Image: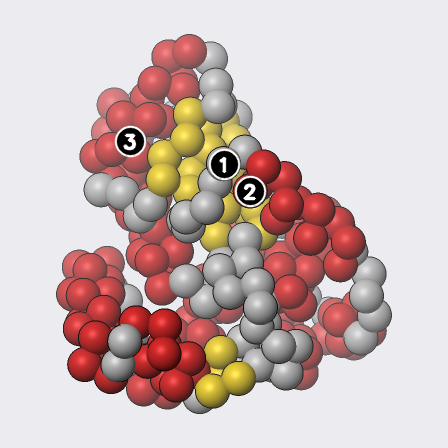
Amino acid sequence: MLTIEIVSDIVCPWCFIGTRRLAAAVALVRQDVPDFSFRKHWLPFFLNPDTPPEGEPYLPFLEKKFGGREQVEAIFERVRAAGRPYGIDYAFEKIALRANTLKAHRLIHRAQTVDADPAKIDALVERLFAAQFQRGEYVGDPAVLTALAAECGYDAPTIAAYLATNQDEDVVKRQAAEVQQMGINMVPTFILPGRQIIVGAEDPAILAAGIRKALQAG
């Protein structure tokens, strides 16, 4: 069983594409190694660590960061073009607020440590990305996070109670700091056994080559 660690943030559009490119890479590997099995382990990254807990208007932030509306629209179009081949239709126009993702990362952490059902974790992460980039749902809102977790099979009252506390906040922040101490400052980043680090939403062929190398070394 190969472990693929994925450093990502829910508000990173390339991280959404990275999940699909990883799936395509796995399919390539299984053409040669049909019984190849792996598990994903998600690690937190804060793309915008200065985001207020209550969030802030999305477009104004991007326009200030990238130099204006025209530049932002060009970035949106590049991301849309990259996502289309993988079935992702981005709806940036639906995003009202830039979200603080600490609670979303805590939710993923809890799913990986308390329930640890790979299918439910995959569904949860997919649903978080869809909420952010396709449905216009505010992923900084505990009520929204609770509802989408319930859609993925988690107990809503338990999740709501968990998100109402600060439980695991220090753990998630420590994990994010450890990732940065490794020199990782871009997402997505894939960490394969043997400390192979593949930065960016790379072409599936590159990810597949990394997986094959890890399998041969293992």
- Image coordinates of residue 184 in percent, x first then y, are 48, 40
Tag shown at residue 208: 3
Crowding around mark 1 (Cα neighbors within 10 Å: few <14, some 14 to 19, many 20+) is few
Q: Amino acid at mark 3?
A: Ala
Q: Is residue 105 left or right of residue 34?
A: right
- Image coordinates of residue 96 in percent, x first then y, are 44, 88
Tag 1 residue: 183
- The residue shown at (69%, 53%) is 173
Report the Cα–Cα distance between label 2 and label 1. 5 Å
- Image coordinates of residue 76 in percent, x first then y, are 24, 73
Q: Amino acid at mark 1?
A: Gly
**Tags 3 and 1 touching, CB below 8 Å:** no
Residue 165 visible in the snapshot: yes
**Tags 3 and 2 touching, CB below 8 Å:** no
Crowding around mark 3 (Cα neighbors within 10 Å: few <14, some 14 to 19, many 20+) is many
Crowding around mark 2 (Cα neighbors within 10 Å: few <14, some 14 to 19, many 20+) is few
Report the Cα–Cα distance between label 3 and label 1. 23 Å
Q: Is residue 167 left or right of residue 16?
A: right
- The residue shown at (27%, 43%) is 202
Q: Is residue 62 left or right of residue 7?
A: left
Tag 2 residue: 180
Q: Amino acid at mark 2?
A: Gln
**Along the viewing direction, whichever of 180 and 152 lies nearer the viewer:** 180
- What kind of element bears circle 2? helix
Give the total of numbered labels: 3
**Tags 2 and 1 touching, CB below 8 Å:** yes
Using the image, determine if residue 215 lies above or below residue 168.
above
- What kind of element bears circle 1? loop
- The residue shown at (61%, 48%) is 176
Using the image, determine if residue 103 lies above or below residue 73.
above
Picture quadrant where residue 165 is located:
bottom right
